[in-house]
Amino acid sequence: MELDQIYESIRDDLDKVKETLTSISQIDFSWLSEQLSYVLKETGKGIRPALTLLSGRFYDYNITYLLPMAVSVELMHTATLVHDDAIDKAEIRRGHPTINSMWGDDIAVLMGDYLFARAGEAVADTQSTRAVKLFSQTLGIISSGEINQYRNSFNLEQTREDYFKRIYGKTASLFALSAQSGAILSHAPEEAVEILKNYGDNLGTAFQIVDDILDFTSTEEVMGKPVGSDLTQGTLTLPAMMLMERYPDDNPVRSLFKTGDKKNVDLAIEMVLNSSIIDDCYQVASEYCELACRDFDLLPEKSSRQALLGLAKYVVKRSE
Amino acid sequence: MELDQIYESIRDDLDKVKETLTSISQIDFSWLSEQLSYVLKETGKGIRPALTLLSGRFYDYNITYLLPMAVSVELMHTATLVHDDAIDKAEIRRGHPTINSMWGDDIAVLMGDYLFARAGEAVADTQSTRAVKLFSQTLGIISSGEINQYRNSFNLEQTREDYFKRIYGKTASLFALSAQSGAILSHAPEEAVEILKNYGDNLGTAFQIVDDILDFTSTEEVMGKPVGSDLTQGTLTLPAMMLMERYPDDNPVRSLFKTGDKKNVDLAIEMVLNSSIIDDCYQVASEYCELACRDFDLLPEKSSRQALLGLAKYVVKRSE
């Protein structure tokens, strides 16, 4: 299934999400408006808002509450990217210069804060303090996870457990919120809320593993950012961990982290590509996708069940 | 009235606010815990939480909802300070090294985000989506106001209107939220909500004017940060504006902003202190305090009415 097909049942509402994001940039403050429209124009694949809308389709689908939630998860995602790029000194995101590279780190910090504020406003419009609480808890998980990642950059003493904890903070927690909140706002029974939260969590884990694979296998043209970014920033992802496991004594990742010599980035990529590591990582991602859908039989037979199953397949097949 | 006397009726609950802030730093993540306890230990005069609690005393005072609100306004305040200090490269705050000077700008950004998240969690505990919405709107006002201030640093073409707009974003908006939310969460009638919101707004304006005065008249020892910081960072405050108005052709503020020569900071301070500008600024602050209390006759005769009147007097008398 292609993304277009997966999104079919929520196409109109996803368009509304886009319209709302556009309207947020049209504020009475011309300079900020320019930057907001810049950052909100390229919103990627929209998987997080789609998760909210699709998860909301099983019971009382009410767009009045689902729309602001879908908007808020996308805004929170964008805000965290703006802050992350400033911290990582990233220059390119989604094929365009980052906010920090265009207007400096300080503006990026304040712009991220402004986006958090607008995300908070949107989540308040759900009229659900449970959604607000989960939203804030997720932001706490994401930001403390980022602190953890930052503290552990260029640290070789990390286990797979550390890795999965980190990508939960980075990606899976927001995927889980996106799906879980859709269920809550459509008055799903608690069992279904749990199933959809579990779906988001595992799907997000698989999504991030694939992201980490693409940082080795893709090209800057396709990804919209340089390959090897993770290694360059000292972030140990699953492919790099597998390389370390296979060559524990001497390998380019170890050399890179110890000496900072950037030529090791290309060497590490080459070694990974000339091994079975990529296949093995895809295998791990696929297992998470299976986990994501394990209790789907218990959900009502709606079209969104097929869509979410399709999304789980798409996530490990995607090339960008 | 001294602050102790003003806070008398809410002393126990203010202690609970402090305890809750302390408990927030005791999380299962030891390194972050150290920094959180560092940033949450020195919480200043606690005027914002006090405003929430005192404003909540006129009708159904319910600490279950007022406590998380009071905690959330203090956390939001702390989060914005952490980000502002990183942006301003400030080294000292409340007599201690800032987060950015201790652990770097990147950690300060993420720490601020984490504090926003905890503030959001707390406001969700009020069970009031109206409070959440106002909270988020206020964060939007604060962060877009900061962007505005940042963009206008070292800009001589600013009017008093610009100044009052700026200090609304910087301080008055959060004072207004603190008071207004206390009223809302104690089920005050809408007229009283408006009176207390207006109180917070005008009190915050007066408070910030006095802050801007103290940046000229105080000492680093008393303030816990260097004097003349505003001018050094190119921020045009009321005393500096009055100096510009009195000596439109040539004055040290103009020279500082045009040439960047820091010796003009001391010259400007000297000229301001040798004029009636400080008295005139206090006069403006006092007028805002009068405005703050103008409709107080319409509020129920509770002890907190006296306390808030006392706070309005305290704000223009304070020396730190």
Image (tube, coloured by chain):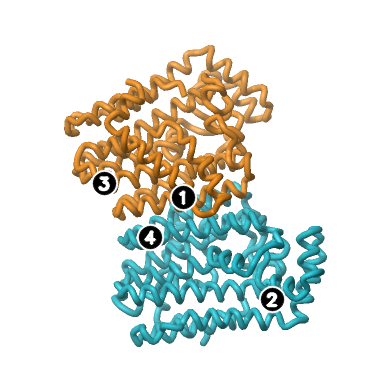
Chain colours: A orange, B cyan
Q: Relative to residue B92, is residue A260 depicted above or below?
A: above
Instruction: Give the Cα distance between marks 1 and 4.
Output: 15 Å
Q: Are marks 4 and 2 on the same chain?
A: yes
Residue A19 screen position, x and y as percent: 40, 41
Residue for badge 1: A116
Mark 3 and mark 1 in contact (Cβ < 8 Å)?
no
Would you call the spot at circle 4 few (<14 residues within 10 Å), some (14-19), or many (20 or more)? Answer: many
The subunit carrying tag 4 is B
Tag 4 residue = B123
**The quarter of the displayed image where residue A253 is located:** top right
Q: Are marks 1 and 3 on the same chain?
A: yes
Q: Amino acid at mark 3?
A: Leu
At x 78%, y 76%, the residue is B271
Q: Same chain, marks 1 and 4?
A: no
Q: Label 1: chain? A: A
- Characterize the local packing of mark 2: few (<14), some (14-19) or many (20 or more) Cα atoms within 10 angstroms: some
Q: CA separation, marks 4 and 2?
A: 35 Å
Give the amino acid type for the residue marked by disc 1 in the picture. Answer: Phe
Taking the image as shown, residue A232 lies to the left or right of residue A320, namely right
Q: Earlier in the sequence, mark 4 or mark 2?
A: 4
The part of the image, by quadrant, that contains residue A244 is: top right
SS type, badge 4: helix
Please give the label number shown on residue B146: none
Q: Chain of mark 2?
A: B
Please name whichever residue, B263 or B189, is drawn nearer the observer in this view of the structure: B189
Q: Nearer the viewer, residue B187 or B64?
A: B187
In the drawing, what numbered circle is on residue A185? 3
Q: Chain of mark 3?
A: A
